[in-house]
Amino acid sequence: MDEFPVKGMDAVVFAVGNAKQTAHFYSTAFGMRRVAYRGPENGSPDEAVHVLESGGARFVFRGPVRAGTDLGRHVAEHGDGVVDLAIAVPDAEAAYRHAVSNGATGIEEPHVLEDEHGKVVVASIATYGETRHSLVDRSNYSGAYLPGFTAADPIVAPPERRNFQAVDHCVGNVERMEEWAGFYHRVMGFTDMAEFVGDDIATEYSALMSKVVADGTRKVKFPLNEPAESRKKSQIEEYLEFYGGPGVQHIALATNDILASVDAMRAAGVEFLATPDSYYQDAELRARIGEVRVPVEELQRRGVLVDRDEDGYLLQIFTKPVQDRPTVFFELIERHGSLGFGKGNFKALFEAIEREQALRGNL
């Protein structure tokens, strides 16, 4: 019996300096649709919150509207970033009790939020840094997001096709990977899905170690990274320095047409990491990946990476950081059987990140 069953990701919640402008960026650049809002106009005097969706992916942007709030402090210390990886569960109270009894620190006891659209049960526990996991049971609710929010019109006309349909995985940068992997094993009953050490994730200059924990259904997947000893500053060390501690490094978004999504998002101003032509001309890569659904030349033209494992293949690409601090970025991923994370692309990806680090003077 699964003692901590989950339904999937409920929402990725961000703390940002200006929620209105952030919501506009994700509407125009990512093609998301605003569905709900809460602010001073409807009972939230200290913060404005915009809720955006794309298929099953839900982003919530919280911004302070007055000085002196804890939300404002968080943004000042960390910049824009993720404060809550909310998980949909069938029973929030049972999930909370199980987590706390297995060593999790409770932040919010289970409580009911209710309005004319029904009720939602919410609780929350602490994880790495100042990140939390809200545990959300919305099975008896039909409103736009949560009680207290009002339905909101899109900020701009949504695109004809979605750029992505779901959150595939959420990556955390931590200082003690094994400790946090143990936390997810103990508190949520998650198991190890993959582990990358040593030369798996190393370049000439930097290295890191990573372990992926996931629930039994693989609907919720949390890779955890920590820096490894290396010649220069790794991307994880850069993140920890600029974010001011552990936090969410990137969100992977599942798409069923990565080429169309990259074209649309790039045209809207999203910047992606560049991949050198030599990556696509490597004979070993071409032999390993075999046939994929599009010509390699089309992937090359957009900088999309490809990897294959025993289950199939995947296509992936990464954005540059989407705020001024070199912290949070995004991944687009198109899976064709593969359950992996692009191990064969790690070296190319991290060399691309290092080129950006060098430009920032942080390598």
Image: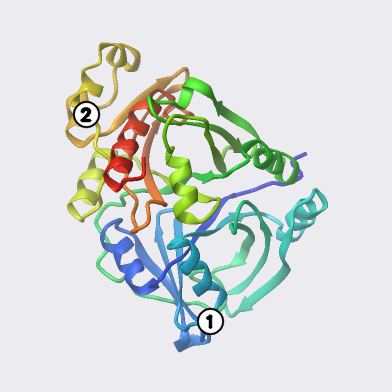
Mark 1 vs mark 2: in front: 1
Identify which amino acid the numbered label 1 is placed on: Gly
Q: Position of residue 250 (x, y in %)?
A: 44, 47
| Direction from residue 280 to residue 307 in the image, left or right | right
Nearer to the camera, 313 or 270: 270
Q: Which residue is mark 2?
A: 276
Helix or strand or loop: what does disc 1 sit on? Answer: loop
Reading the image, the residue beneath label 1 is 68
Say what amino acid the circle numbered 2 marks: Pro
Going by the image, does 258 lie left or right of 342? left
Horizontal and vertical percent position of residue 200: 47, 23
For the N terminus, which image quadrant?
top right
Q: Which mark is residue 318?
A: none
Task: Pick whichever of labels 1 and 2 is earlier in the sequence.
Answer: 1
**Front-lying residue, 321 or 78:** 78
Q: Residues within 10 Å of mark 1 (few under 14, many from 20)?
A: few
Q: Kindly identify the residue that appears in the image at 49 percent across and 65 percent down.
A: 77
x and y percent of residue 31 in the render? 29, 58
